Image (spheres, grey):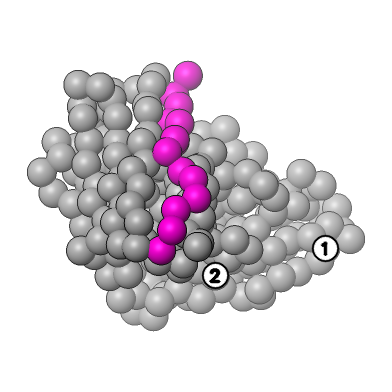
Amino acid sequence: DIQMTQSPSSLSASVGDRVTITCRASQSISRYLNWYQQKPGKAPKLLIYAASTLQSGVPSRFTGGGSGTDFTLTISSLQSEDLATYYCQQSDSLPLTFGPGTKVDIK
Amino acid sequence: EVQVVESGGGLVQPGGSLRLSCATSGFTFSSHWMHWVRQAPGKGLVWVTRINDVGTTSTYADSVKGRFTISRDNAKNKLYLEMTSLRAEDTAVYYCVRDSHSSGMDVWGTGTTVIVSS
């Protein structure tokens, strides 16, 4: 199975800050990497697929990058509504696996 | 509006069975592969199972293989998850999720809660 790790596990930042979350796969997954946002008490929402393609309706302050084993999710200017846990997920091979999540708090 | 709505969760004793349903609307159900993803209380997301668009191929996480069965009825636009031999560690919110043709899991339901406890 492909193991996914994320760092940091949590962070606290101010509105307007640039925030970067890192996701690493235990083996190369090309660009088969998706990012999800889960707000407290809500279902996850797809933010980015294929490592860097923004899902329709997602604000442009979210960007994804990377390939192979190392990936990033960047929020260019953190907003209060971005308070959530962010998960990466590989879709290269079964079983599909998620990272453990990064909880983003607003200072 | 594209929508998936889960139902069928509840409290069940260890060793018991439960059948989850997912009613879909607003899209061509028979064109999409579908997943079940679960989330234990306070924990992360875990993929459970996937079925292809015509219902002929399914794959399972090792943790549920042989105990859970995914199925679909394309005439009714519904997805199912039959769960047997339930264990305490199966306690979770179960999400019905649409696969967007290799572009991520793009439609999620609000989830249905399964609690396995005596």
Residue B4 highlighted magenta (yes or no): yes
Q: Residues within 10 Å of mark 1 (few under 14, many from 20)?
A: some
Q: What residue is drawn where x is 67% and y is 47%?
A: A41
Q: Earlier in the sequence, mark 1 or mark 2?
A: 1
SS state under label 2: loop
| Chain label for disc 1 | A
Which residue in the structure is indicated by mark 1?
Answer: A13
Q: Decide if residue A49 is on the left or right side of residue A11.
A: left
**Farthest bottom residue?**
A26
SS state under label 1: strand
- The circle on residue A100 is 2
**Identity of the amino acid at label 1?**
Ala
User: Which quarter of the figure has residue A14?
Assistant: bottom right
**Farthest left residue?**
B56
Q: What stretch is highlighted in magenta?
A: B1-14
Work out whether residue A65 or residue B98 is closer to the camera in this orientation and state it: B98
**Identity of the amino acid at label 2?**
Pro
- In the rendered structure, are the residues bearing label 1 and label 2 in contact, judged by CB atoms less than 8 Å apart? no
